[in-house]
Amino acid sequence: MLLNWYEISGVKICQCGMIAAWDSLDGWFCPGCKSEKKGGEIEVTKLEINFTKTVEDGENIHGSVEMNVPETTEEAAKIYGEDVVYGLMLAALKVDAQRICRAAETVEGAQAAISEWVPGVKRARVGGVSEDALVARLQKLSPDKLASILAKAGITT
């Protein structure tokens, strides 16, 4: 059975996910699916991954690593498989949706926000300050400053 292999940073990767081994008689050979490989190269880009880890003594270790990733979703699907790419997309959507829901005041508000949400489309942020937070801010203002702000808003006292 002939499948495609791909090269990332000089390493041949079989479509089954195994790193291919060189067999001088047959070209590239996959020890996982026992297939010879033919195919082409995939363009990759470097993804920088920053992390922090707390070790046993409570100290934080900060680090950064690089990972080669395919440049397009089509190339990612060729390497990892469509199911994996789809699963990763669902996981990312879920994280974004949870962030949107946490910003809502009620479950109904969360559902309304999710119903209007289009992934990848930026929306202008609205509100962002609860009534209690606004009152706390206004109470810190001097009477003159408060009167000035209310006058700008067209509110007379």
Image: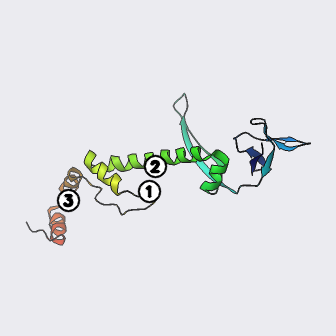
- The first of marks 1 and 2 along the sequence is 2
- Alpha-carbon span between mark 3 and mark 2: 41 Å
Q: Residue 107 placed where, x, y %?
A: 27, 45
Q: Look at mark 2 in the image and give the residue it sits on.
A: 93
Q: Which of marks 3 and 1 is nearer the N terminus?
A: 1
> Do we see residue 20 in this rendering?
yes
Does residue 62 appear to the left or right of 118 in the view shown? right
Helix, strand or loop for disc 3 = loop
Q: Where is residue 124 in the image (x, y as percent from the top left)?
A: 36, 63
Q: Is residue 105 visible?
A: no
Instruction: Identify residue type, mark 2.
Output: Leu
Tell me how the rendering is colored: rainbow
Amino acid at the residue labelled 1: Pro
From this viewpoint, which residue is outermost toward the right? 25
Q: Is residue 86 left or right of residue 121?
A: right
Measured Cα–Cα span from mark 1 to mark 2: 8 Å
Which residue matches tag 3? Answer: 141
47 lies left or right of 124: right
Indicate which disc residue 54 carries: none
Would you say the residues marked 1 and 2 are in contact, meaning their CB atoms lie under 8 Å apart?
Answer: yes
Q: Nearer the viewer, residue 114 or 45?
A: 114
In space, the residues marked 3 and 1 are separated at their CA atoms by 39 Å
Foreground of the two, 76 or 2:
2
Q: Is mark 2 on a helix, strand or loop?
A: helix
Ranked by sequence position, the earlier of labels 3 and 2 is: 2
Could you tell me which residue is drawn at 32 percent across and 54 percent down? Answer: 113
Which numbered dot is residue 119?
1
When asked about the image quadrant of residue 128, the answer is bottom left
Q: SS for tag 1?
A: loop
Residue beneath the point at 26% across and 48% down: 108
Measured as percent of width and height from the top left, residue 137 is found at 23, 55
